[in-house]
């Protein structure tokens, strides 16, 4: 028979109970990495994940500034500039000066970019549903609620 967690039989080193917080952190990271890896593999040649994120953000709200996109996508301004440069070179976005402030430029989807985004979004949504299918609907709702609560508790200090 096994010894209870944290206890040991004579001559054995006591086992440490896993740190719940660190274990949760590792599971969150592992789950994120597994999901991103599968999405990256399945989206494949159609788009990179950063480009997909850019297109999805612009499909939700076209004509965003680089600073706004940087904040929403959680990437540095330098990384975003390179991403937009490549997307512009490939004809999926275009930069235009802000009509009310010529110091700013705004990023817009081209018709080609809009078609690509509209093609990728449903495929992405279907893939995410497949990846989460190991949880039933009630479990997904509870996980969403708990992750929202975690996000809100983490965001609170930044807003103060």
Image (tube, helix red, strand yellow):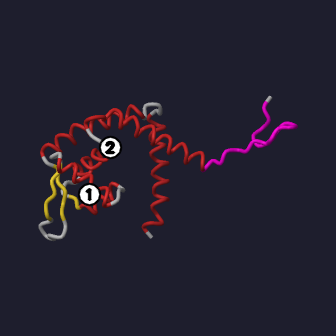
> Residues in magenta?
2-21
**152 over 100 or under it: above or below:** above
Magenta segment, prevailing SS (helix, strand or loop): loop
Coordinates of residue 157 in the picture (x, y in percent)? 48, 66
Residue placed most toward the observer, 78 or 151: 78
Mark nearer the N terminus (1 vs 2): 2
Instruction: Indicate left or right for 40 with 56 as reference.
Output: right
Give the image quarter of residue 7.
Answer: top right
Measuring 47% from the left and 37% from the top, which residue is drawn there? 138
Instruction: Indicate left or right for 14 with 79 as reference.
Output: right
Q: Which residue is mark 1?
A: 81
- Report if residue 11 lies within the magenta region: yes
**147 over 39 or under it: above or below:** below
- How far apart, in angstroms, are the residues tagged by discs 1 and 2? 16 Å
Q: Which mark is residue 49?
A: 2
Image quadrant where one finds the C terminus: bottom left
Measuring 47% from the left and 33% from the top, which residue is drawn there? 135
Coordinates of residue 41 in the picture (x, y in percent)? 36, 34
């Amino acid at each position: 028979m096994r010894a209870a967690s944290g206890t040991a039989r004579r001559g054995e080193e006591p086992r440490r109970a896993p740190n719940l917080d660190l274990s949760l952190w590792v599971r969150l990271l592992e789950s994120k990495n597994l999901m991103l890896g599968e999405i990256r593999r399945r989206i494949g040649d159609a788009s990179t994940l950063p480009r997909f994120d850019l297109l999805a953000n612009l499909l939700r709200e076209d004509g965003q500034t680089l600073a706004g996109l940087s904040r929403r996508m959680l990437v540095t301004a330098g990384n975003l500039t390179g991403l937009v440069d490549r997307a512009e070179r490939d004809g999926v976005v275009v930069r235009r000066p802000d009509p009310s402030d010529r110091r700013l430029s705004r990023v817009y989807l081209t018709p080609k970019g809009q078609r690509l985004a509209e093609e990728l979004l449903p495929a992405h949504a279907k893939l995410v549903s497949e990846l989460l299918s190991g949880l039933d609907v009630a479990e997904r709702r509870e996980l969403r609620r708990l992750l929202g609560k975690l996000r809100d508790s983490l965001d609170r200090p930044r807003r103060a």
